[in-house]
Amino acid sequence: MKNAMKTGAVIDRFEGDNAVLLVGKDERQAVFPTAGLPEGLSEGDYIRMEISYDAKATKAAMKESTRLLDALRGRRS
């Protein structure tokens, strides 16, 4: 699996509890909850982001979804 991806983003605007970010050189739009951002940021501020794969969380989520599906189908896990 590829190492973490690092990129930058600029805060374009705030909409309710979300920030609209323009990410990377292409300035692709992404909506991100403001609760996950450092306090005190304003429109026009630049941030750095690091995105990485979490194998442990993925495995746990898959196990939980299988358990829930089995419960819906009337099976025990």
Image (spheres, rainbow, N blue to C red):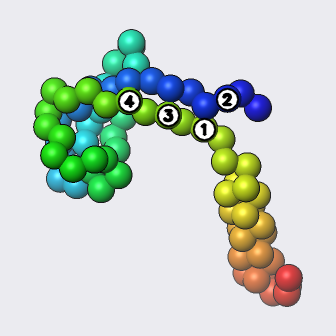
Q: Which residue is mark 3?
A: 50
Which quarter of the rendered picture does the N terminus lie within? top right
Query: Which residue is found at the position 30% from the left and 56% from the top?
Result: 35
Circle 3/circle 1 CB separation < 8 Å: yes
Number of marks = 4
Q: SS of the residue at dot 3? A: strand
Task: Find residue 3 and name its label.
Answer: 2
Q: SS of the residue at dot 1? A: loop
Circle 4/circle 3 CB separation < 8 Å: yes
Q: Residues within 10 Å of mark 2 (few under 14, many from 20)?
A: few
Amino acid type at mark 4: Arg
Along the polypeptide, which appears first: circle 2 or circle 3?
2
Q: Pinpoint residue 29: horizontal percent, then vertical percent.
A: 34, 28
Circle 2/circle 1 CB separation < 8 Å: yes
Front residue of 13 and 47: 47
Q: Which residue is mark 1?
A: 52
Residue 40 visible in the current orientation: yes
Q: SS of the residue at dot 4? A: strand
Which quarter of the rendered picture does the C terminus lie within? bottom right
Quadrant of the rendered image containing residue 72: bottom right
In the rendered view, would you say 40 is above or below 44?
below
Front residue of 67 and 22: 22
Q: Pinpoint residue 57: horizontal percent, then vertical percent.
A: 67, 57
Q: Which residue is mark 4?
A: 48
Residue 28 visible in the current orientation: no
Q: CA distance from mark 2 to mark 1?
A: 7 Å
Q: Residues within 10 Å of mark 4 (few under 14, many from 20)?
A: few
Amino acid type at mark 3: Glu
From the viewer's perspective, tell me whether residue 45 is left or right of residue 63.
Answer: left
Amino acid type at mark 2: Asn
Along the polypeptide, which appears first: circle 2 or circle 1?
2
In the rendered view, would you say 12 is above or below 58?
above
